[in-house]
Image (tube, rainbow, N blue to C red):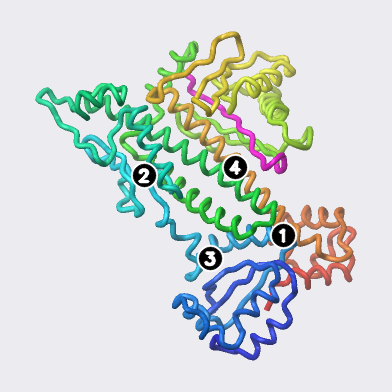
Amino acid sequence: MPTGNAPNLKAKVRQLPDRPGVYLMKDRLGRIIYVGKARSLKKRVSTYFQAGRRVRETQPKIRALLGLIVDFDIVEVKSEPEALLLEGKLIKQWRPRYNTDFTDDKRFLLVRLDPGEEMPRFRLTRVKRDERSRYFGPFAHSGPLRRTLQQMRRRFGILLADATPRQLADGTWQLYDDIREEIYEHPAIVTKEAYRARVDAACEFLDGRSREWLASLRGEMAAAAGRRAFEEAAALRDVVFALEQTLKKTRNFTRTDPTRPDGGADALQQLQQALGLEHPPRTMECFDISHISGTFVVASMVRFTDGRPDKAQYRRFQIRSFMGNDDFRAMEEVVGRRYRRLQEEKKTFPDLVVIDGGRGQIGAALKAFLLLECEPPALIGLAKKEETIFFPDARAPLRLSLAHSGLQLLQRLRDEAHRFANTYNADLRSKKIRESILEDIPGLGPSRRAALLAHFGNLDRLRAATAAQIAEVKGVGPRLSAEIAVFLATPD
C-alpha cells in the first residue's frame, strides 16, 4: 500500500464518481508525480490502493510510484476523448516524474545535420547530441525513413552518413565516383556553395515531410478516438507530441542556421523575377484554413515584411457565413473580411497575397476581391504537393527549383500561416473541451452558460469566482450560483 494517510485515501476513493476523468497522484510534498486518464475514476484510482498490488507489480518504476503516493486530485470530464486530451495537456503542463511517454522521444529516429561540417551529411540518430546541429523528426518507422533518405540522395544530390567526399586540387569537391553520377542524376564534382544549395533544398523537403506526417498522425489519432480505440489514440498522441516538440526545436534552430537563407533582399528579388512583379514584394500576406473534419473551422493570416515575420500584423478568423467543411467558401470569406477592412480603413494592400492551396483556393480568393469591387494585389496560390505556384490568370503553373531562395521564402510564409491556423484550432478545441463541464450542471442551459462565459471571460475566472460574484450574472439566482460554485470547486 502507498505510505501516508492511507485510511483517508481509502475514504476518498470510495467517494469518487463512476465517470470519465483524469487523476493526478501527489507525493508527500504535494508535487504531482503522475497523471492518468480513466473511463471510470472510481474503478481506476481504486486499483492503486488495493491490498497487495505493490507486491504484484514487477516493474521497479511502478513499485516506486506506488510507494510515493500520499494524495490525489481528480478532474471529471464528459467522455473518454476529453479525458485523453486533458491528460495530455496536464502532462505537458506539469511534466510529472513518472510520465515518460510525453517527455522522452529517444525511441524515435531523428535525421541529424551538422552545418559546421565543410560538406554536411545527413545522418540517422536517436539522441540529440548537440544544439548546433539541426534535427528532423522524430520518425517512428526506420524502414520508410531510410528509403526517404535514399530518394533524397538521388533527388537532391546530397551526402548520407556513409559518404566520404574528396576535395580536389582546384578547391571543388568530388562527392562520389563517376559511375554513381548517372545513378544520382547530379554532378559528382561541385563547389562548396553549390552543395550548400542542395542541402538547403533537402532540408526544406525533409521539414515538409515531417509536417505531412504530423498532419497524418493527427488524423489517425482523431479516427482512433472516434471509434473508441483510446489506447491506440493515446499512443498516437504521444508520437504527435514528440514530433511537435522536435519541429518546434527545429524552427528555433533555423533562425541561426547558416545553411538556410535568411529571407532578405536576394530572396525578394528572386521572387520578383520569378513571378514577374513590378518590384520586390516587401510586404506579403498568406492565408490558411484549418479544421478537423469540418468542425472548428478557422483561418489564419500571417504577414512578412522584408522577408521576416511581422507578428503584430497576424490575424485569425472564425468562419461565420456557414457551418461545415468547405475550404473554398472559408477562403472567400476570410480574404473578403481582411481586405474589406483594409479598404474601409484606407490602408495599403500588401505587395503579394499568397493562398495556401491550388486553383480552387486561389479562385475563391479572387472572387472575394471581385465582390469587393477592388483591384487585387499580386495574387498566387502555393500548393504543397510538388510546391507548385498557381496564378489567377491564364499563366501556366510554375514550379521553381527547391533550392530557389524565393520559393523557400514562400514556403516559410506558408508554413507560418499553417502553424498559426493549427494553433488557433487547437486552442478552440481545448477551450470547448474545458467549457463542456458546464453542461453537466443541472439547471444550467445554453443561454445561461453563454452568459456566464461572457461575463467572466473564461472557465478559469468562473471557477475562481465566489457564489456571490456568480449571482451577479443576469439570469443566475443565489441558489443556482451556489450550486455552480460547489460544482466547479477544486476537489480537496
* Alpha carbon separation for disc pair 3 and 1: 20 Å
Instruction: Give the quarter of the figure containing the N terminus.
Output: bottom right
Mark carried by residue 111: 2
At horizontal 56% and vertical 24% (from top left) the residue drawn is: 354
Image position, residue 299 (x, y; %): 65, 36
Image position, residue 425 (x, y; %): 64, 44
Mark 2 residue type: Val
Q: Which residue is mark 3?
A: 94
Q: Which residue is mark 1?
A: 459
Mark 2: secondary structure: strand
Using the rendered view, name the quadrant where residue 180 is placed: top left
Q: Which residue is mark 4?
A: 422
Mark 4: secondary structure: helix
Which comes sooner in the sequence, label 3 or label 4? 3
At horizontal 81% and vertical 60% (from top left) the residue drawn is: 439
262 shown above or below 437: above
Q: Is residue 261 visible?
A: no
Mark 3 residue type: Trp
Q: Nearer the viewer, mark 1 or mark 2?
A: 2
Image position, residue 291 (x, y; %): 67, 40
